[in-house]
Amino acid sequence: MKTEHHYFTYIVCSASGTLYIGVTNSIYRRALEHKRGEIEGFASKYHCDRLVYYEGFDDVQKAIAREKQLKGWRRSKKIALIESKNPQWEDLAEKWGAQMLSAAEAIKDR
């Protein structure tokens, strides 16, 4: 039986390139909270609202350890990590929360 990821270490950035690293148990919810400016403190102050990187973990302690590791890295190493998976720095959550058609609606509209 495959274990699903229930914890995530993630990186969001601002339009000017400020990075914020965090941990969550719902990457979907947390990305939307960042977009709405609901994460108080550093992320909100610097408008870090674009999800550019995330990793899933089955254990919260592993996710926290990875967060601490990434926070200890030089900026250049963080950028290299982001670009290894997301070279264009696309907002990975850009379309999350958008209204989607159900399968029945898609067929009906054809």
Image (tube, rainbow, N blue to C red):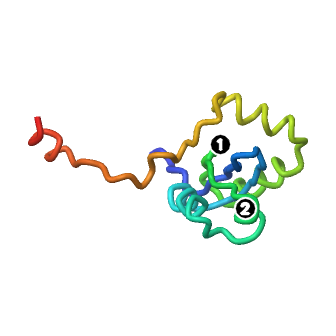
What residue is at 65 percent from the left and 35 percent from the top? 89
- From the image, tell me which residue sits under label 1: 53
Q: Nearer the viewer, mark 2 or mark 1?
A: 2
Q: Which residue occupies 54% across, 60% down?
A: 26
Comparing 67 with 59, the one in front is 67
> Quadrant of the image for the N terminus?
top left
- Percent x, y of residue 12: 68, 50
Residue, x 57% and y 58% (percent of image)?
A: 35
Please give left or right for residue 72 compared with residue 67 in the image: right
Between the residue at mark 2 and the residue at mark 1, the CA separation in whole angstroms equals 15 Å
Q: Residue at x 70, y 65 (%)?
A: 44
Say which quadrant the C terminus sits in.
top left
Q: What crowding class fits label 1: few (fewer than 14 Cα within 10 Å), some (14-19), or many (20 or more)?
A: many
In the image, what residue type sits under mark 1?
Tyr
Element class at badge 1: strand
Tally of marks: 2
Please identify the residue farthest to the front as the structure is shown: 16
Q: Amino acid at mark 2?
A: Ala
First in residue order: circle 2 vs circle 1: 2
Residue 43 is tagged as 2
